[in-house]
Image (cartoon, rainbow, N blue to C red):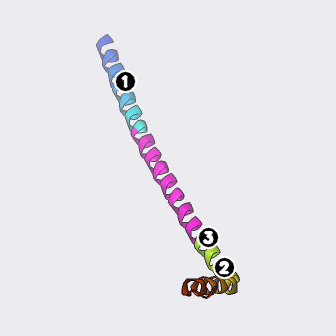
Amino acid sequence: MRCSAGHSQKGEQEMLKELALRVLVALQGIESKVKDEEGQTLAEYGLIMAVIAVAVVVVAVVAFRTAIIGAFTSATNCLDGSC
């Protein structure tokens, strides 16, 4: 009878080891997905910042259009020698 108890303890230990291994593998899978999502989130924020930067440049060019044209006209006139 003692032998069967020993076999059942070994079987339980093997089952616990297998369960622990499956839990660790599942946790590693979840961890890798979370890391991938963090990278995706960072890339998304980078794209949003790029779109905002382009929008700010466009608004600045539209807002200061006459000043920019005047500065280029003045620079062209100076290069032509009529400053």
Q: Which residue is mark 3?
A: 52
- Could you say where residue 49 lies in the image, as x and y percent from the top left? 59, 65
The stretch drawn in magenta includes residue 20: no
Going by the numbered disc 2, the residue's amino acid type is Val
Mark 3 and mark 1 lie on one chain; the one further toward the N terminus is 1
In three-dimensional space, the C-alpha distance between marks 3 and 1, rounded to whole angstroms, equals: 58 Å
Above or below for 22 versus 77: above
Asked whether residue 27 appears in the rendered view, the answer is yes
Judging depth in this view, the residue of 11 and 5 nearest the camera is 11
Image side of residue 69 versus residue 8, left or right: right
Asked whether residue 1 appears in the rendered view, the answer is no
* Residue located 54% across and 62% down the image: 46
- Could you say where residue 61 lies in the image, as x and y percent from the top left? 64, 80
Above or below for 30 versus 54: above
Image side of residue 9 versus residue 38, left or right: left
Mark 3 and mark 2 lie on one chain; the one further toward the N terminus is 3
- Could you say where residue 24 lies in the image, as x and y percent from the top left? 42, 36
Task: Indicate which disc residue 30 carries.
Answer: none
Judging depth in this view, the residue of 58 and 11 nearest the camera is 58
Residues rendered magenta in the picture: 25-52
In three-dimensional space, the C-alpha distance between marks 2 and 1, rounded to whole angstroms, equals: 69 Å
Going by the numbered disc 1, the residue's amino acid type is Gln
The stretch drawn in magenta includes residue 43: yes
* Residue located 42% across and 41% down the image: 28
Quadrant of res 9: top left
Task: Indicate which disc residue 59 carries.
Answer: 2
- Could you say where residue 62 lies in the image, as x and y percent from the top left? 66, 84
Task: Indicate which disc residue 13 carries.
Answer: 1
Helix, strand or loop status at disc 3 = helix
In three-dimensional space, the C-alpha distance between marks 3 and 2, rounded to whole angstroms, equals: 10 Å
Image side of residue 3 versus residue 43, left or right: left
